[in-house]
Amino acid sequence: MSVELYDTIEKATIIPYLELDNVTLEVDIPLPSQGINVRAATRIIWYDWRAPSSARLGLLFEHMGAEDRTKWEEFVRELGEN
């Protein structure tokens, strides 16, 4: 999964933290077609700095609860059908 991150805190204090090894992020992913969010534990596997206060991140899902995984799989299937 790829996301774009903007650091809105003055002096971009969060983004440099993401360069550390083994950073795990808990993310809430909105599923617009279902009107819900799913939560996942992810690990950063690549990043691309856009500006001092923004970056694109490649995230690897490491853990997702069973109910959220089912909702995520349904969402991905719907994308494939459209």
Image (cartoon, grey):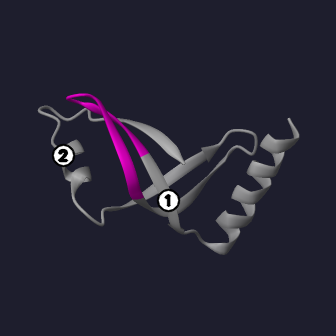
Q: Which residue occupies the extreme left position in the image?
A: 11
Q: What type is the residue that disc 2 sits on?
A: Pro
Horizontal arrangement in the rendering, residue 63 relative to residue 11 (left or right): right
For the residues labelled 1 and 2, the Cα–Cα distance comes to 19 Å
Q: Which residue occupies the extreme right position in the image?
A: 81
Say which residue label 2 marks.
16
Horizontal arrangement in the rendering, residue 71 relative to residue 24 (left or right): right
Asked if the magenta segment contains residue 34, the reply would be no
**Crowding at mark 1 (Cα within 10 Å: few <14, some 14-19, many 20+):** some
Residue 80 bears which disc, if any?
none
The quadrant holding residue 73 is bottom right
Residue 68 at x, y percent in the picture: 65, 64
Say which residue label 1 marks.
60
Q: Residue at x 60, y 44 (%)?
A: 30
Q: Residue at x 75, y 45 (%)?
A: 34
Q: Which residues are magenta?
A: 44-57
